[in-house]
Image (cartoon, helix red, strand yellow):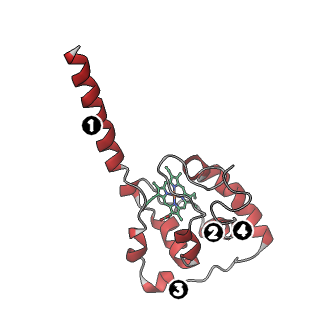
Amino acid sequence: MKMRMLLVAAAAILYSSSSLLMAEADGKWLARVPDEDKARVNPLAGQAKAAAAGKIIFEENCARCHGVDANGLHNRPSLRSERVRHATDGQLAWMLRNGNPYKGMPPWNSLPEQQRWQVITYLRTLPPAGAAGGKP
Ligand code: HEC
């Protein structure tokens, strides 16, 4: 019986330390984006065709972590948050190129740059988290 309680306690500690490793997204990456990257402009901004292409790229590459609705899944952040909405296109482009592997966000430099801009164009079409069309 005692042994069992010890095991339960050990499992709880393991669980909480692994969730510490997967700490909640805190936006610290934003401070690492150089000014010239931050100022970059999305050449495809507002283009419906680019957004449609970006949606497909999103579903293939991003939805498994950020959710099909982009509201975030298991500790992976929503991409409809205030933070993402307020980030510049250039900041998002930097995050897509470099990722933050230490915190579980892969770099997407294997996607052509054009496709990264398409995903960003798509993200800009999403309503804010919690708005109509958000998580049911
Ligand atoms: C393997 C899981 C995974 C996949 C796949 C993934 N991401 Fe992420 N993403 C993360 C995690 C974890 C973070 C939090 C990183 C941090 O806090 O620095 C994150 C952070 C982000 C952020 C910053 C959000 C914020 O609130 O700070 C953006 C933007 C983003 N991802 C876009 C994308 C896009 C677009 C794709 C697809 C091309 C994608 N991600 C694919 C795991 C993933």
**Mark 3 and 2 residues: CB-CB less than 8 Å, in contact?**
no
| Element at label 4 | loop
Tell which tag, 1 or 2, sits nearer the viewer.
1
For the residue with label 2, is its CB less than 8 Å from the closest atom of ligand 1?
Answer: yes
Tell which tag, 3 or 1, sits nearer the viewer.
1
Image position of 89 (left or right of 37): right
Image position of 127 (left or right of 39): right
Q: Nearer the viewer, residue 17 or 3?
A: 3
For residue 120, the mark is: 2
| Element at label 3 | loop
Q: Which residue is mark 1?
A: 13
Q: In the picture shown, does residue 36 fall above or below 27?
A: below
Residue 32, quarter of picture: bottom left
Tell which tag, 3 or 4, sits nearer the viewer.
4
For the point 71% across and 59% down, the residue is 55
Position of the N terminus, as image quadrant, is: top left
Q: Position of residue 45 (x, y in %)?
A: 70, 77
Type of amino acid under label 1: Ile
Type of amino acid under label 2: Ile
Q: Nearer the viewer, residue 16 or 94?
A: 16
